[in-house]
Each structure stands twice: as C-alpha cells, then as structure tokens.
DNA sequence: CTCGAATGTGTAACCGGTTACACAAAATAT
DNA sequence: ATATTTTGTGTAACCGGTTACACATTCGAG
C-alpha cells in the first residue's frame, strides 16, 4: 500500500505539502502541486480514509434510523437518503430501531464512537436524553419536533383535512376514522386534520385507534363494521390500515366504493396495486428524505441554515375506492 | 477523551498490557487485569474503534448491495441482514446499485478503502472483474452462482414447478407464464421449473417475458388477455407482476379466480393485502438474509465453512386467486 | 540442580494520515 | 532601503490504538 510518505518522497516534497495539496488547504506552489500530482498518478496513490478519520473525526458516514425498514413507508425514504448522500460523497448506515429506545440509544452511541458524521432519525422519542446530549448533527423525519433539531415532515394536518373532505364531498353520511397510535406525532396531526374537516360538516363520525398494521386493522375494522352497519366511509391514517379495512369490507361482502368509500394516507406503492386502487393522501416520501439529507449534510459541513422546519406538501391521489364526485 | 495511555497510567501498567487485557490476547496476570479493569471503570474509558481499525483493517461494517431497496423483495432481506449483523456486533451499510455495474464497482471500491469487512450482494454480475479481484469476503444472495462466492438462494426451480402444479391441479387448460428478465438467474430457474411441470401435462401454455414491475406487467398482461381470450391461468415469476396481472384482469372484467387463476412468486407482504389474496410461492426472504449474514461473518472471522451453496426452501401460500382444488 | 518452556510485562515502532509551528523567500507597503 | 505581509515548505507531534520484540520471572521436567 502506498502511503503519503511514498508520494512525498517521489515528489521530492514533505508529507505536509502532499497533504495540503490533497486537501486543498494551505499554500502549495504550482511546481509542488505538479510534482505531487505526478507522483500520485505514478504510484496510483489512494488516500486512506480511516487514517484521515482518526484525525478529523469525520467519516462521511451518516446513520439512518427507522423503526422498521419492512414498513412500506421507509424503503422509499431510505432510497432518497441514499441517493442524495451518494451525491455528496456520503454513505448510509441503516438502523432498525423497532421504536425501542434502548436499541436506538445503542446505535447512537456505537456509531458516534465510530465517528459517524450525523443522523437522520424517524423516532417518537426525540426528546429522550440520549438525543439532547448528542452533540452531533441530527435531522428528524416525519415525527416529533424538538427545538434544536431540524425536522422534515408532511403537512399531516392539512392532508388529513383534505382526505376527509374527499369523503364528505362524495356524500358519506357516517365516517369511521382510523386514528393512528397516540404516541405518534403525525398520527395526532392527522387526527386534528380530520377533526378540522368533520367538525362543522354535520356528518356523523366515529374514531377508533388502530395501529399501522394490516392484520390488526382488518380485525378492528371487521368488528366495527359488524357493529355499525351504517358506516359508508372510512378514512384510515395509513395506507396499510386502509388495506386492512378494504380486506375486512371484502370479507363482509361490502362493496367498495358503492356501499363504502375508503381513503388512506401515505401513498405507498401498494395503493395502486390494489383493486380497486386506493384513494389516498400521498406523502412525497422521496422528497422528505432528500430534503432531510441535504439539511443534515449542510449541518455536518457547518453551512448555516436558519430554517428549522421543513414542510412537504401532500397530494391527493383519487383512485377507485372513492366514487366520482358529482352526484 | 480518555485514551489507552490514561488507563495505563492510572492502572500502573503499560499500554501493551491494557491492550492485551482489552483484546483478551497474550498474557495478562490476574493482578494486572484487576488494576486495568478498575482504571477503565473509573475513567469511563471507551476504546476508539477508528484508531483500532487503522491497525487491524477491520471495522465491523458490512455492505449490503441491493438493486433497489424500494423493490418490495428487499426490505425484509435488509431487515434480516441488519438483525443478524447486530447480533454479532456488525453494522450494515446500505447500497442501491440499480443493477448498474459502475455504481456497484464504485461502492465496492469506496467501502473497501474504508476497511469494510465484507459484502452481501444481490447482483447479476458476480462474474464481473471487480468481484474477482476483491480479496474481501463476499456472499451472493438470490442470484448468480460463482465458483468462489458462497451463494444463498431459494430453490427457484422446484418452487416454480410447485406453483405451476397449483394451476394444473385446479384445472387450468391454458396457462400464461410471465417469465422474468432473461439476465436474471432466478428468473431462468423459475422458467425451467415451469417447463418441468408443464411439459408432460399436455396443457397448453404461453410464455411472455415480463419485468418484475407492476405497471409494465399490467400493460403486457392486458395485451395478452385481449389477444388470447382462453387463458385461464397465469403464473407470474414475481408477486409484483402477479399484481399487475390481477389489475389487468380486473380492468377487463375477468373474474379471479372463477375465470382466471393467478399464482405469484416471492411471498411479499402485499400478497395478502390484495383482494382476493394472492396465491404464491413464498420465499423465506428473512431466512435467506439471515443465513447469508451468518455465512459472511463466519468468513470474515476466518471460521472455516466448507459449504458453498445454501438453498432455502420455498413454501406454497394458497390464497384467493386460485380455487379450491377438488373438482 | 539445571534448563527449556510458559508466563508476564514494557518499550517503541507502526497503522497512515493531519496540522501547529518555525522558518525562509518573495511581494508589498512605507 | 527597511518593515511588514503574504506565500511556501518542512519537521515533528499527534490522532488512539496494536503488536513485534526484548527481557524477566516462574514452573515443571529430567
């Protein structure tokens, strides 16, 4: 392995000059630069990033902490993070936290020791002490807003209001809202948005807490639909729970969208694979990931960025689980 | 930051002794061990892994190269890799290759310089020169088998035969096989399996090449179904293309499973969210990822492992896109 | 009792970079 | 012409570990 000393010797300069040349820092004369460049080329020298990291405490590594990459919301996010990171010369470490604070903390600490440069985090415990003392650039995604941590999120509240209006405009008279887990910020925002839209509509509604999980949602919706025969619209806080609802409806022989209209939230790819296609409030997950990554890298590279909160607009995707609007 | 020298001083021993104690290598007396342990505790010493890596050229990092994490087949794989890696104290770097050899090569080289310990690769270019000269532990997943690279894969051929038989047993008289891309090994194996089962059945069949992509598949199947009205069974080489086929059938008003039965391959979560549920040949993706990771780590840690090929059995999941078997 | 092997420890080189600092030469200001 | 600043370079310390090697002691075998 050729080292910087080999290069220095061959170029007839000191290692300091070579290092300055390589990092474009400090003064290097034209002659020296030429000599070093030639030596680098001739020796096929490649800088050892680990040795560099030992000094600089930087690694061009960023951590992406998600609850579970298996949740269909996250792969696209990961993809965006990876794409943007690559553009800037960074590499992504994937961490599944299972929403487990211990696991999360463990990752944070282990990777910090490895001189990781920063984290993009999807977590609902951003206020936990292990984040406060972090002293490392962090960007929060989708969830939880903390004073000191920049956050990228969809306008969940407005999005949920939009989704609700889709059902209202299409004549629903009794709407079931599948509220997400109460400990999740975005789920709460969506609940607020639903309430915003439903409150003055005069339409009857019902709220049931339902995890973002297919089988659980199917079970819950099955029960509710059996108990309350007159429900003609469901707004689910996630596409996965919407899929569960559709399944339950199908098993009960309830026709969608004729007897029951369904709207989801998220915009995951599965939505259009269903038949009928799932009407949904689509988040621009890729964009969220891309923004988060850029913000993080800016922080890592000490560029000033005054903005702290980045809201990414959602977009309605009207598909087959709702009827056409005019009566 | 406390260093090994601080610990040595406090414990009244040399840095070599501390290092030996920490690494459990060489001789360390009971007294020395106790003194060092106490010093470590008192100083809250934590070893700097980057400094260590500079010497050992190991980082406890492994790379996972997938074509695209967004493809629903891969998140579960990534999850398995991550879970097992964590167990052994390794961390996972995620790389999306887009099947692009340049990108792949670039990752390989960049990360090798960072002293990454090994790679798990899902690629169809394992014979490419950049793999041959790698001199790093690699395990191949799902695709391509190379003399020197251990491979973990499903028994695609037998699985495809099983899937085909599902249609045959249920009385299909004219089967359409959606063959995957010809450059993918597993797709070819599935084709062979299909042929194995169909050849002597006397049943008519048709083969169409179809990428593992929803919209493309829908388009292709739509065309074929329009042209050939008598198709009563479709075996798709992937669940995503099966979903496309179902969508096409629905749009054409063809009833599944009454007029047309469909079987997929992969066993991704989406399959059960569809209505009717997708009958499929399920791969045990999690297991594949877990095995691959264990094999890789064994290699990294120089444990001998004679076995080179690991076949993971597939499992039939009979759901609603096929009828019950008895006539 | 002698000797070779096993046990235990420290010094210093090394992994491969970065960078503070000292110093010299050239350019600019006075 | 002198003082000051800018430019350019090298030496050596440093980042924080690992480890080859030399050396000392203890132990069991013969």
Image (cartoon, coloured by chain):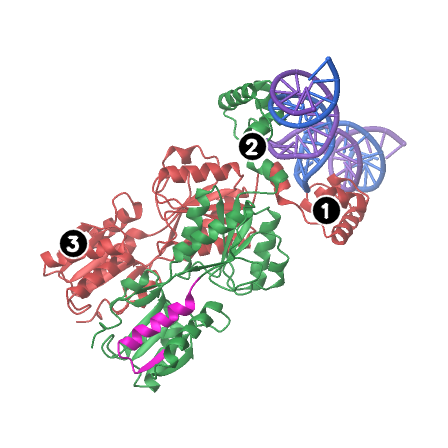
Chain colours: A green, B red, C purple, D blue
Discs 3, 1: same chain: yes
Q: Secondary structure at mark 3?
A: loop
**Which numbered circle lies on residue B140?**
none
Residue shown at the point (58%, 59%) measured from the top left: A148
Q: Quadrant of residue B159?
A: bottom left
Q: Secondary structure at mark 1?
A: loop
In the rendered image of this protein, does residue A206 appear above or below residue B87? below
Locate residue A256, reporting x and y percent: 25, 75
In the rendered image of this protein, does residue A244 appear above or below residue A294? below
Determine the chain carrying the residue at label 1.
B
> Which portion, as a residue range, is magenta?
A154-176
Q: Quadrant of residue A201?
A: bottom left
Say which of B224 and A83 sits in front.
A83
Q: Work out how far the residue at label 3 is from the one at label 1, CA to CA, in angstroms.
A: 73 Å
Discs 2, 3: same chain: no
Determine the chain carrying the residue at label 3.
B
Say which of B39 and A301 sits in front.
A301
- Residue underneath mark 2: A23
- Residue underneath mark 1: B2
Closer to the camera: disc 2 or disc 3? Answer: 2
In the rendered image of this protein, does residue A307 appear above or below residue A167? above
Locate residue A266, reporting x and y percent: 37, 64
Residue B304 visible? The answer is: no
Q: Residues within 10 Å of mark 1 (few under 14, many from 20)?
A: few
Mark with earlier residue (3, 1): 1
Closer to the camera: disc 2 or disc 1? Answer: 2
Residue shown at the point (34%, 43%) measured from the top left: B99
Locate residue B20, reporting x and y percent: 71, 42
Closer to the camera: disc 3 or disc 1? Answer: 1
Q: Work out how far the residue at label 2 is from the one at label 1, CA to CA, in angstroms.
A: 29 Å
**Which numbered circle lies on residue B200?**
3
Q: Work out how far the residue at label 2 is from the one at label 3, CA to CA, in angstroms.
A: 68 Å
């Amino acid at each position: 392995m050729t080292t910087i000393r080999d290069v220095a010797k061959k170029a007839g300069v000191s290692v300091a000059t070579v290092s300055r040349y390589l990092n474009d820092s400090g003064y290097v004369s034209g002659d020296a630069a030429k000599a070093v460049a030639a030596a680098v080329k001739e020796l096929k020298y490649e800088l050892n990033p680990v040795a560099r990291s030992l000094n600089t405490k930087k690694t061009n590594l960023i951590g992406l902490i998600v609850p579970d990459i298996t949740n269909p919301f996250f792969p696209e996010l990961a993809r965006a993070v990876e794409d943007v990171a690559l553009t800037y010369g960074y590499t992504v470490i994937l961490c599944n936290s299972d929403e487990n604070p211990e696991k999360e903390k463990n990752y944070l600490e282990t990777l910090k020791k490895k001189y990781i440069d920063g984290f993009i985090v999807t977590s609902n415990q951003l206020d936990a002490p292990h984040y406060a003392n972090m002293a490392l650039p962090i960007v929060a995604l989708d969830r939880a807003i903390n004073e000191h941590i920049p956050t990228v999120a969809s306008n969940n509240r407005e999005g949920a209001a939009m989704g609700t209006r889709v059902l209202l405009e299409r004549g629903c008279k009794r709407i079931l809202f599948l509220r997400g887990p109460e400990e999740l910020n975005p789920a709460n925002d969506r609940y607020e948005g639903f309430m915003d839209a439903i409150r003055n509509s005069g339409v009857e509604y019902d709220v049931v807490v339902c995890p973002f999980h297919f089988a659980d949602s199917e079970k819950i919706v099955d029960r509710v639909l059996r108990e309350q025969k007159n429900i003609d619209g469901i707004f689910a806080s996630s596409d996965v729970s919407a899929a569960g609802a559709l399944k339950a409806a199908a098993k009960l022989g309830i026709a969608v969208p004729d007897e029951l209209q369904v709207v989801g939230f998220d915009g995951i790819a599965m939505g259009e694979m269903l038949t009928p296609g799932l009407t949904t409030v689509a988040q621009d997950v890729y964009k969220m990931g891309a923004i988060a990554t850029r913000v993080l890298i800016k922080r890592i590279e000490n560029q000033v960025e005054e903005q702290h909160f980045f809201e990414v607009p959602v977009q309605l995707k009207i598909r087959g689980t709702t009827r056409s609007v005019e009566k």
